[in-house]
Image (tube, grey):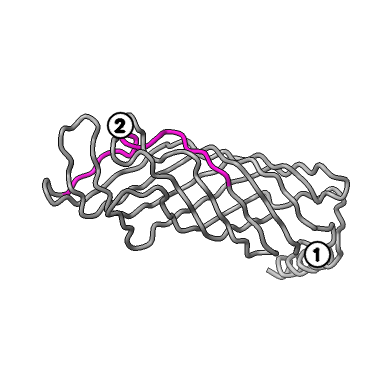
Amino acid sequence: MRFLIVFFIFFSSLGFAQSSEKVVDSLFREDQIYFSISYNFLQNKPENFSQYSFSAGLTTGVLRDFPISKNRHWSIAPGIGYSYNDLKQNIDFLDASSSSSDVIVRSKLTLHYLEMPLEIRWRNATPESHKFWRIHTGFKVSYLVGGTFRYESSTIGNGSFKATEIANRFQYGAYVAFGFNTWNPYIYYGLNPIFDKNKTTLENNVTAFNVGLKFYIL
């Protein structure tokens, strides 16, 4: 037991001594893990459309930072990640194969995406400090890997089916994240419809618009 106490004290003091020394890395890379939380607004909404509760959007993933300027203030960063979107609304859903529509009182569309972002970055980071201003603009392609559409209907009751039956497999859009240190406002603008026009006739122009915060580490 005495040996273990001495061992612990020795390596603790060694670790403290090493951490107290400032290591300057002239080949530093920044912001290689990301996480965002946002609110899902929907654009090109149909008539009598409304959202309820909180329609959340969550993303997380990794990016590989490749500096392209000598001072490493400019870089590009490709990556891969996961996106979760929870859309709560009262869409009157019309199936293209059906001759009549079901009047939807409330519905919830849950979407799970594999996303592939590519960022162009500016930051005024230095080897001595990890607190800096940043502007990261990007474009990402998302592939729908799963999800569910659940609804409450005034005509046929409650029901659900797979999101792939009505949603486009691919989504793509542009985004920007900017700020200082930890807090970074985040905006994403979808460039193609969420719903597949070959599977729906009423809602095929609805696009995504997310506003929230994005966090980068490492």
| Kind of residue at disc 1 | Ser
Q: Nearer the viewer, residue 71 or 97?
A: 97
The count of marks equals 2
Residue 169: in magenta span: yes
Residue 210: in magenta span: no
From the image, tell me which residue sits under label 2: 199
Q: In which quarter of the view is residue 18 placed? A: bottom right
Residue 66, placed above or below residue 36: above
From the image, tell me which residue sits under label 1: 19
Instruction: Give me the residue at 84% from left, 48% from top.
Output: 27
Instruction: Give me the residue at 42% from left, 36% from top.
Output: 145
How packed is label 2: few (under 14 Cα within 10 Å), some, or many (20 or more)? Answer: some
Q: Position of residue 116 (x, y in %)?
A: 57, 38
Instruction: Give me the residue at 72% from left, 48% from top.
Output: 121
Q: In which quarter of the view is residue 179 placed? A: bottom right
Measured in 3D between alpha carbons, the distance from the residue under mark 1 to the one under mark 2, in whole angstroms, is 58 Å
- Say which label, 1 or 2, has the lower sequence index: 1
Which stretch appears magenta? 158-174
Q: Which mark is residue 54?
A: none
Q: Quadrant of the N terminus?
A: bottom right
Q: Position of residue 83 (x, y in %)?
A: 48, 46
| Kind of residue at disc 2 | Lys
Q: Helix or strand or loop: what does disc 1 sit on?
A: helix
Q: Position of residue 213 (x, y in %)?
A: 56, 60
Q: Quadrant of the C terminus?
A: bottom right
Q: Nearer the viewer, residue 24 or 91?
A: 91
Q: Nearer the viewer, residue 14 or 38?
A: 38
Mark 1 near mark 2, Cβ–Cβ under 8 Å? no
